[in-house]
Image: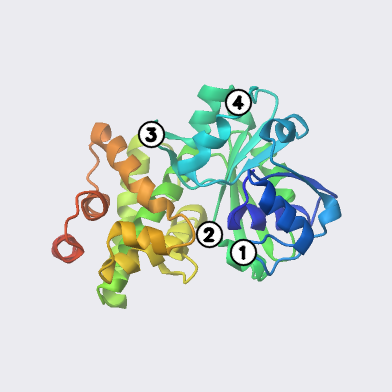
Amino acid sequence: MGGGSWATAIAKMVLNNEDSINWYMRRDDRIADFKRMGHNPAYLSSVSFDINRINFSSDINAVVEDSDILVFATPSPYIKMHLAKLRGKLTNKFVVSAIKGVVPEENVLISEYFMHQYDAQQENIAVIAGPCHAEEIALERISYLTIACADIEKALRFGSKLSCSYVNTCASDDVEGIEYSSVLKNVYAIAAGICNGLKYGDNFQAVLMSNAAVEMRNFIDFVCPRPRNISESAYMGDLLVTGYSQFSRNRIFGTMIGKGYSVKAAQLEMEMVAEGYYGTKCMKEINRTQHVNMPILDAMYNILYENISPIIEIKLLTDSMR
């Protein structure tokens, strides 16, 4: 479900192990171009596909009805728009979220939204976590994924559909914790980008990421307490790759703001959605009821939504960090 870079990367992985897939894209012109060219015309165009193994459709209801496993890989700001067309429930489906965000306005996790709005069963909902950039899947560079599901056996079975010579998968049952970390790491990657744009060096970037990991741990442990190791790749690894990678759209977005772009100008220039922009607002609103001390999140909200100077906000962070 989705036509972007992450959806394309997941399709590439699955087709290493499955004979065919159903693929929902909302635009018929994109589907026609995909069939004609043999690759996604807009994202990861270097990845070639055997079109005979893909059943394309712009009808979300037809795809859902004909599929047992549904992998949603649309940007979080648009998930409600896509699902608004869905007429049935998802009670008997295995639902996988590859979405690194929170449902806007609702301010709930994607897994919670599927359960409450579409009757998906908790044991039949999984989430995909990195550290993994779609661009490196396209290049077939060694990558690691964590599949989180309340039912570990189901997580392992789905993971086997993604595993291949360049992708290793493991399983977790910390669905909520991994979802929250996937949202927050995008926020912190914007912070890293802003510092990069402001010409802060590697020394401060390292301190920023260390403090971000502590802030992430404090929030997740408070909101959904349970034993977890924040140093594992699904949390720390995803945070680091999103904060440092040249492929990180959130870091790129932040770098543009640090260099003096307005938020609107940076959004217009980017060809892909920076999920952290929307995640910042959602997490700020969620934390208004949780009251966890989150200075980096607060600084990003002030920069992105209150038009406070990045120079001022980052200077305040430098004075507070250890």
Are the residues flagged by discs 2 and 1 in contact, CB closer than 8 Å? yes
The amino acid sitting under disc 1 is: Ser
The amino acid sitting under disc 2 is: Pro
Report the Cα–Cα distance between label 1 and label 3.
30 Å
Residue toward you, 95 or 218: 95
Q: Earlier in the sequence, mark 3 or mark 4?
A: 3
Judged from the image, the secondary structure of the residue bearing numbered disc 1 is: strand
Q: Which mark is residue 131?
A: 2
Q: Which mark is residue 143?
A: 1
Report the Cα–Cα distance between label 4 and label 2.
26 Å
Would you name the residue on which mark 3 appears? 107
The amino acid sitting under disc 3 is: Asn
Q: Which mark is residue 120?
A: 4
Are the residues flagged by discs 1 and 3 in contact, CB closer than 8 Å? no
The x, y position of residue 148, in whole percent, is 58, 42
In the rendered image, is residue 263 in sight? yes
Eye-nearest disc, 1 or 4: 4
Instruction: Name which quarter of the figure residue 59 lies in.
Output: top right
